[in-house]
Amino acid sequence: MLLSAQQIQDWDAYTIAHEPIASIDLMERAAAKCVQWLSAQFYSQQSFHIFCGKGNNGGDGLAIARLLLEKGSDVTVYVLEFGAKGTEDFQLNLQRLHTLTPNIHFIQSAEFFPSVSREDIVIDALFGSGLNRPLQELSAALVNHINLSEATVIAIDVPSGMFIDKSSLGNTIIKARDTLTFQSLKFCLLLAENAPFFGYVHVLDIGLLPAFLEEVQTQYSLLLQQTITGFLKERFAFSHKGHHGHALLIAGNYGKMGAALLAAKAAVRTGTGLLTMYIPGDMATVMHTSLPEAMVLPRERSISVWDAYACVGAGPGLGTDEASEQTLYKLLYYYHQPIVLDADALNILSQHPEWWHLVPKNAVLTPHPKEFERMFGPCANEVERIEKAIAVSKEQEWIIVLKGHHSFIACDGKGYFNITGNAGLAKGGSGDVLTGMITGLLAQKHPPLEAALLGVYLHGLAADLALENQSMESLIPSDVTEAIGKAYVFVRGN
């Protein structure tokens, strides 16, 4: 689960009360984990400039400074000074630090900004997860000064200026090379719009009590392997192809048969028992040659018995011409079982909102951001897009798979972030593979939400496992399809 800023503070308080542990000692534990990480990167022999606010994030910075000094590191500390007294733990760590070094400076104006070189290590401990308004004036100026230094910047918990659970677009934010976040990933560290600021994220376990998580509810969750493993079905020895579903894929058009092939191969690799491709008739030879496992039904022929298919996937390479529109309309009018709508199916729907009432409940829609906004209108930022996906999923009773580096699945007012996958998926055709996978899972009688979650996770995991033989640059969607079997084996743990 992904906690709000308030819930993160409550988790600290719960651990302090129930471990029990003094808050200053919990801060010491967090600082020690940070120093351990810094030492493992061989940073401890370089010069550190540690910038601290006067809250508990600044207290973390002071404790890190003291522990680095005890290791013999060259450390200079700068405290952003507004005249207000710091938190109790900040004040105690400041007293401790004064006994070790005179190199503690208070920044009261831009005149006190230090010179920082690109060879230095900057520790950003100015503002933590409790920030609720954009940085202004002296704070913003200091962050801009640090960003211009070209030094290696390590942010503690979250980069200063970044909100935990709302959009930070337009904020002045520290540009960190690495972010050392405590105990769990944060909502803000899953957003593409924040990626230029948080760099590489490292989750440090500081021993917060897991029992707290049993007492809270959150709108957003992470899609984890233990959840996915529970979705897998056992394939019985005496089963036959009919037991594993007959899927129909409405895909492909002139110049776009590659999309249909990618989706088809993924559906078969994911486990559907039978697959029929509803494609232009003169493209049948392409399909029979490239994927003999698939049957072909020419699109020039009408489908008389739609319910013969366990599920339908529509959209990859379909086109948006009038014939494609009519094909999609017939699907929506006559078919009332699970469907997956992607690519051109979504583009057609964006032009015909009067058809939306025909889209069945629990349909799985898999838009990328532009396709999403064509259907549902422009969004000012990524958080607004996520919130709109949540609202649409609840209003229309659809499952929205908003594709991205951390694909987001919205259903019935809740959302799930996927954490498998890599930048090698940033190529045309990756979405077609995902559509085929979800279609194949629906054919095997996975409930629609389960099929969406399992498909997205396995898709990303297959891309990760394919890197055993490829690089992110060389990875192509076909490599992902070929690694689906490895992904199944990995999730099952055998």
Image (cartoon, grey):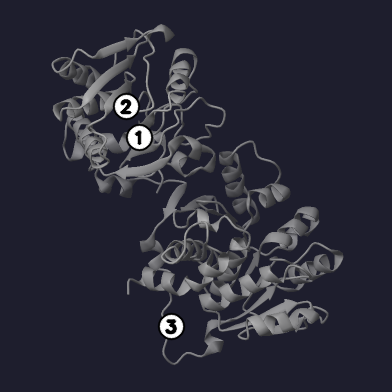
Question: Mark 1: which secondary structure?
Answer: loop
Amino acid type of the residue tagged 1 in the rendering: Asp
> Which residue is more in the foreground, 471 or 126?
471
- Which sits in the foreground, 122 or 492? 122
Q: Nearer the viewer, mark 2 or mark 3?
A: 2
Mark 3 to mark 1: distance in Å? 44 Å
Q: Does the residue at mark 1 contact the one at mark 2 (Cβ under 8 Å)? A: yes
Label 1 Cα crowd, 10 Å radius (few <14 / some 14-19 / many 20+)? many
Q: Nearer the viewer, residue 78 or 312?
A: 78
Lateral position of residue 167 relative to residue 58, left or right = right
| SS label for mark 2 | helix
Q: Is residue 227 above or below residue 94?
A: below
Q: Earlier in the sequence, mark 1 or mark 2?
A: 2
Q: Is residue 122 left or right of residue 196?
A: left
- Residue hosting label 3: 235
Instruction: State left or right for residue 138 relative to residue 120.
Output: right
Residue 195 at x, y percent in the picture: 49, 40
The residue that mark 2 highlights is 57
Would you name the residue on which mark 1 appears? 157
Residue at x 26%, y 40% (from the top left corner): 37
